[in-house]
Image (cartoon, helix red, strand yellow):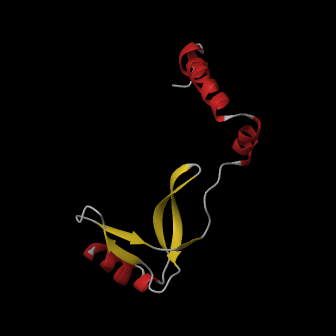
């Protein structure tokens, strides 16, 4: 907890400056620029295991990453199961079956 508190104090101006953080979103875990919005900027609590701290905060994110428009078009037309079923045959074709210089190794 001391390292986190020092980061907030010295690196991000007591929580007032933006910082980079990896957040979970629809395309996985991606780095984003964020700022604390609360006052105080975060709420610490001892975890149930008593070995860690849980830190809760509200963040303002500059822009969450989204899939490209082309990927979005595919996602609208096909289910997750259909996309998963396509991936193995496509991988085999591109990396195993294509002859010589056309192969994507």
- Frontmost residue, 90 versus 28: 28
Residue 47, image x, y percentages: 30, 66
The vertical placement of 35 against 50, above or below, is below
Name the one closer to the observer, 53 or 8: 53
- Residue beneath the point at 23% across and 66% down: 50
Q: Kindly identify the residue that appears in the image at 62 percent across and 24 percent down.
A: 85
Give the side of residue 74 with respect to residue 56, left or right: right
**Residue for point 51% across, 76% down:** 35
Q: Position of residue 1 (x, y in %)?
A: 28, 73
Residue 90: x and y, percent? 62, 23
Return the x and y of residue 57 as percentages of the image width and height.
46, 74
Q: How many numbered discs sit on the rendered protein?
A: 0
Q: Is residue 26 left or right of residue 1?
A: right
x 59%, y 51%: residue: 26
Instruction: Kindly give the residue lying farthest to the front in the view shown.
Output: 48
| Picture layout, residue 99 above or below residue 20 | above
The answer to which quarter of the image holds residue 61 is bottom right
Identify which residue, 18 or 37, lies in the foreground: 37
As drawn, the residue found furthest toward the left would be: 51
Location of residue 58 with respect to 21 vertically, above or below: below
């Amino acid at each position: 907890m001391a390292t986190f508190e020092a980061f907030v104090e010295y690196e991000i101006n007591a929580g007032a400056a933006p910082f980079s953080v990896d957040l979970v979103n629809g395309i996985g875990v991606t780095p984003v620029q964020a700022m604390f919005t609360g006052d105080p900027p975060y709420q610490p609590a001892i975890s149930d295991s008593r070995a860690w701290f849980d830190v809760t905060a509200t963040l303002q994110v500059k822009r969450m990453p989204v899939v490209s428009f082309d990927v979005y078009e595919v996602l609208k037309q096909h289910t997750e199961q259909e996309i998963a079923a396509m991936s193995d045959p496509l991988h085999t074709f591109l990396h195993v079956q294509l002859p010589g210089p056309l192969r994507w190794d």
